[in-house]
Amino acid sequence: GVEGRPLVQRHAPKTGLPLAAGADGLAVSLDGWLYFTPLSSRRLYRVRADHLAAGNTHVEDLGDKGFASDGLLVDAQNRLYATDVEKGAVRRRLPSGKWELLARGEPLSWPDTMTLLPSGRLLVTATQIHRGENVRARDERTRAFHVVLVRLPPG
């Protein structure tokens, strides 16, 4: 859930069912890995991007991230950025597999899409999907979305 509430659909034909979506976060690294994560899961997967065209879809399960993600992004150092929709945060996975917290707080209410700016900062949209009328009785979003600028640690 998000903000202590389960994500349950409120409209037919899926009324009462958990909010579900397939692979939402997708990112390709410079070394040729396609990373993906289902929105309704905490697991992270990857597959060699060049193998997909040849029909080889051996998927590698990288385990439980500890949070559900919407957006993914990989930088030039092959560090994977992931939004954390459960905690309203942005995290970064180092090549070692360790996750680090980069930002957290109210402006990051359901962080969604990210891009790295030439300045080295991270631009993140926060869509508040969990506050929309498909999940709540009425639309409780403060705006349709927010755009948040995240300062990254050196390096």
Image (cartoon, rainbow, N blue to C red):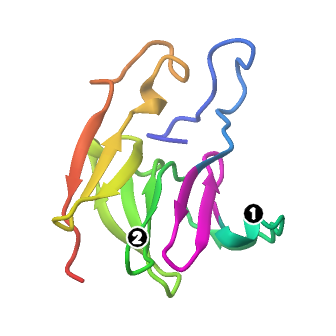
Residue at screen point 64% across, 13% down: 11
Looking at the rendered image, the quarter that the N terminus falls into is: top right
Residue type of the residue flagged with mark 2:
Arg
- Comparing 83 with 1, the one in front is 83
The residue identified by callout 2 is 92
Residue sitting farthest toward the front:
54
Reply above or below: 96 against 21.
below
- Residue 38 belongs to the span the image colors magenta: yes
List x then y, in percent, for residue 133: 49, 16
- Left of 28 or right of it: where is 139? left
Mark 1 — residue? 53
Determine the secondary structure under disc 2: strand
Disc 1 crowd rating (10 Å Cα; few below 14, some 14-19, many 20+) is few
Of all residues, the one furthest to the left in this rendering is: 119
Q: CA distance from mark 1 to mark 2?
A: 28 Å
- Type of amino acid under label 1: Ala
- Residue 50 pos. (x, y %): 68, 71
In-front residue for pair 89/125 = 125
Residue 137 image point, x, y percent: 50, 13
Residue 87 forms part of the magenta stretch:
no
| Residue 120 seen in the figure | yes
Question: Which of pointers 1 and 2 lies earlier in the amino acid sequence?
Answer: 1
Task: Indicate the quadrant containing the C terminus: top left, top right, bottom left or bottom right.
Answer: bottom left
* Magenta span: 25-44
Residue 119 x, y percent position in the rendering:
16, 65
Residue under the image location 37 percent in, 59 percent down: 90
Q: Residue at x 33, y 42 (%)?
A: 125
